[in-house]
Amino acid sequence: MSDCLFCRIVARQIPAEVVYEDDLALAFKDVDPQAPTHVLVVPKRHIPALSETTDDDAALLGHLQRVACRISKDNALSGGFRVVANNGRGAGQSVDHLHYHVLGGRAMKWPPG
Ligand code: AMP
């Protein structure tokens, strides 16, 4: 989608600090990090939100989580990390392109705010 921020990052029309890429996914540093490690993992295909996925996307969703694990290893987050998908405005989703936040490098509280 031409007007989607993360599609434009995937297309390299907007700069981002990319830390991982493959045929299906891109991972880049969040511009406003909420933890020492804060990486966003996105599918290259435009999907507006987790709730917009179908059973056909199950393998892709699994792949994105495997990428999140890879990010945790690359950043030596052996003490723990958090993977978050905000879905919908009420949950804090501000960019309508599916993404997983990978957060680590500090103690995490529960429940999240
Ligand atoms: P969410 O609020 O869950 O939709 O997450 C969107 C995330 O995208 C936020 O954590 C933002 O800081 C991040 N973000 C917004 N614009 C950019 C950008 N140009 N490059 C990297 N991260 C961004």
Image (tube, grey):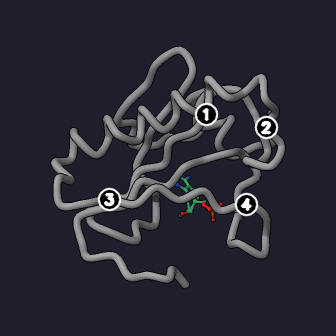
The image's mark for residue 53 is: 2
Looking at the image, which is closer to me, 103 or 7? Answer: 103
Above-or-below relation of 89 to 52: below
- Report the residue marked by disc 1: 61
- Report the residue marked by disc 3: 81
**Gap in angstroms between the C-alphas marked 2 and 4:** 12 Å
Q: Three-letter amino acid code at disc 4?
A: Asn
- Secondary structure of the residue carrying tag 4 is loop
- Secondary structure of the residue carrying tag 1 is helix
Where is residue 11? Give x, y as percent: 62, 26
Where is residue 59? Give x, y as percent: 62, 23
- Report the residue marked by disc 4: 87
Mark 2, other Cα within 10 Å: few <14 / some 14–19 / many ≥20:
some
Looking at the image, which is closer to me, 21 or 62? Answer: 62
Q: Three-letter amino acid code at disc 3?
A: Phe
Above-or-below relation of 98 to 12: below
Q: Quadrant of residue 53?
A: top right
- Secondary structure of the residue carrying tag 3 is strand
Instruction: Please name the residue shown 76% across and 48% down the image.
Output: 49
Q: Three-letter amino acid code at disc 2?
A: Thr
